[in-house]
Image (spheres, helix red, strand yellow):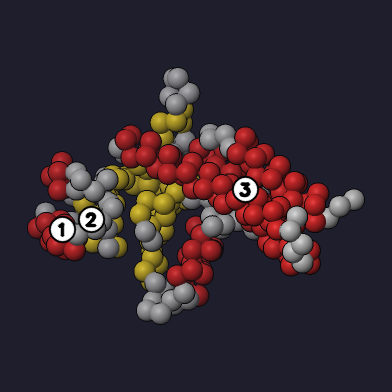
Amino acid sequence: MVLYVVYRAPIESTARSAIPNRLKELGCQQLHRAFWKIDEKKVHRVLKVLENNQPILLKRLREIKNPKLAKKKAFSGLGSLVVVTFALPKGANREKVTNFLRRAPCIRLRRSVYAFSQKHSLYEKEPKLVDALKLVNFIRDIQGNVKTISRVVIVNTASVERLLQETRERVEHGVADIVSSCKEMYKKAHTGNDYAILRDRFSRIKRRFLILKKIAAVYEEWLKIDFSKSIMRAYHALRKVNSVINPA
């Protein structure tokens, strides 16, 4: 059985450089800055080294695993994943990469390491969204180094719970940003600002909302997270602004 581990690097530069050295001493193979292939017999020693760095243990299987719910409807497994790791070339526009990833219903394992569902049909329904293949092609187009590992599952349950929470926060942050922008626009619309400028900005915010709505729908089907109340909050904020800048 092939095992991998990914971790969040410490802020301190000394500790950041010490961890790779200790993992190499254990015979681990570095695939990315903080993504390693490890010997199954040394799992406990590896996790001990990384105990303060939120380690995520993964294993590669031959069969495809579906996401699953525990008996009390708690989410207990993300199912089989496609992990994409990449390193950007020098001088790359990181903001462009960040904006591209905003259209990706995925799970961030750490910086430059993202996990997508192995279930391709989730992404085929929404062609405007980014799946693993689109991310790989995008990184290659900007001359970055990219690798993929398919059919992997997360082993440690605590990591699943943390990643789900971070995914919720990602969507909620997107909603909060849209609502905040709408409130600002609503105030400006009542203080004599140019409506043509406001309509242009409103169109851009609306596009962000539509993408976020599609992403939330994928998460709901994949991870069983209900974002309906949050999405409606953003929708009502948009309607309020639209009623002022585009009166009937």
Give me the disc on residue 10. 2
For residue 241, above or below residue 98:
above
Count of marks, rendered view: 3
Query: Where in the figure is residue 136, as x and y percent of width and height?
Result: 47, 65
* Image point (42%, 44%), residue name: 166
Q: Is residue 143 left or right of residue 227?
A: left
Task: Return the residue at label 3.
Answer: 179
Give the CA distance from mark 3 to mark 1: 40 Å
Bin the neighbour count of mark 1 within 10 Å (Cα to Cα): few under 14, some 14-19, many 20 and up.
few
Local SS, label 1: helix
Q: Specify the quadrant of the image occupied by residue 232.
A: top right
Numbered label attached to residue 15: 1
Relative side of 81 to 25, left or right: right
Q: Please say if 25 is above or below 58.
A: below
Q: Position of residue 57 (x, y in %)?
A: 28, 44
Under tag 3, what secondary structure?
helix
Residue sitting at x 27%, y 51%: 7
Q: Earlier in the sequence, mark 3 or mark 2?
A: 2
Do the numbered discs 1 and 2 sit on residues whose CB atoms are within 8 Å?
yes
Left or right: 27, with 95 as reference point: left
Residue at 47% over, 44% down: 169
Tell me the quadrant of the picture where the N terminus can be found.
Answer: top left
Q: Nearer the viewer's eye, disc 3 or disc 2?
A: 3
In the picture as drawn, the residue positioned furthest to the right comes out as 248
